[in-house]
Amino acid sequence: MTQNDDREVDEILTDSTPEPSPAPQSEASTDEPEASEPIRLQKVLAQAGVASRRAAEEMIDRGRVEVNGEIVREQGMRVDPHTDTIRVDGARIPPPRRHVYLVLNKPRGVVSTMEDPEGRPTLGDIQFDKKSWQQLRLFHVGRLDTDTEGLIFLTNDGDFAHRLAHPKYAVPKTYLAEVEGFMDNKTIRRLEKGLRLDDGPVRPDRVKLVMRSETKSLVEVSLHEGRNRIVRRMMDTIAHPVRKLSRTAIGPVRLGQLGIGEARELTREELGALLDLVKM
């Protein structure tokens, strides 16, 4: 294993860093959206599960639907669902899925690779409830430290994975850290103002104290940049070492009640919001 295999999902990258080569594509993946025959807009909305065709027509009449940034009031307008950007009430309707996008609750102790020459448990060893997922050539989006559990994406869409992992899109991540000791208000404010680590300053987007006692505290930290074990090093700097760390959200996608080791598909709303974040 290389040193990078033990890094958190967000590598040490800056906006000035050249973009890395895209992640490997699956056999079914292509660089460009597939051309498709234009179909009626209300049919696209119905197939996406937004509403029935009749209800979709009413949405169009009311000016609630836009295509490529323009409000549509014309019934029967034909669109290409793979290439046209469609929104209802401002929410992105993703194109028909040619790929799989999974949310996985990674267990602690699992290496964020699909296979490991040292024989350690990996993401590729996790057994899914859906056998069809097991047969796909999936890869992970970024990494989580082996000792960190929580949300990580698996997909066979290389372009999506490449953009989501790249720092220039600044997709925020949220972590829940159980740390040693009673974290007082002064320390919380210090975290909010930002810290200087050995590889430069870091300032969280948000810090929330969830609970505290004499022996431990629970802190939620959101940040859009990441470096090697950044949350753990932040807590070490303020003398509250991490006991347990979990990533609970990436952008609009939250872990929720997903059990450890379980996976689910991104919802239509989650995928649409992520596509907007990474400008796809």
Image: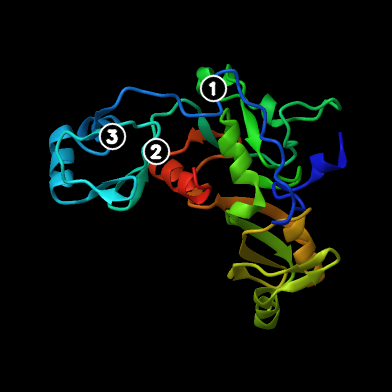
Mark 1 vs 3: CB contact within 8 A: no
User: Is label 3 in contact with label 2 (beta carbons under 8 Å)?
Assistant: no
Q: Is residue 82 left or right of residue 64?
A: right
User: Around disc 3, counting alpha carbons within 10 Å, would you say few (fewer than 14), some (14 to 19), or many (20 or more)?
Assistant: few
Asked if residue 79 can be seen in this view, the reply is: yes
Q: Earlier in the sequence, mark 1 or mark 2?
A: 2
| Residue at 54% from the left image edge and 22% from the top image edge | 133
Q: CA distance from mark 1 to mark 3?
A: 22 Å
Task: Tell me the tag on residue 133.
Answer: 1
Name the residue: 50% across, 27% down. Answer: 99
3 or 2: tag closer to the N-terminus: 3
Q: Quadrant of residue 159?
A: top right
Say which mark, if any, is on residue 49. Answer: 3
Could you say where residue 168 lies in the image, as x and y percent from the top left? 63, 54
Where 252 sits versus 143, above or below?
A: below
Q: Is residue 16 above or below residue 258?
A: below
SS at badge 2: loop
**Image spot of residue 266 (x, y percent):** 46, 38
**Image point (78%, 46%), residue name:** 7
* Mark 1 or mark 3: whose residue is earlier in sequence: 3
| Residue denoted by label 2 | 94
Q: In front: mark 1 or mark 2?
A: 2
Closest to the observer, 51 or 221 = 51
Instruction: Give the quadrant of residue 242.
Output: bottom right
Marks 1 & 2, CB-CB < 8 Å contact? no
Image depth: mark 3 or mark 2 in front = 2
Quadrant housing residue 156: top right
Q: Residues within 10 Å of mark 2 (few under 14, many from 20)?
A: many
* In-image side of 193 versus 6 (left or right): left
The residue carrying pointer 1 sits among few (fewer than 14), some (14 to 19) or many (20 or more) residues within 10 Å by Cα, namely: some
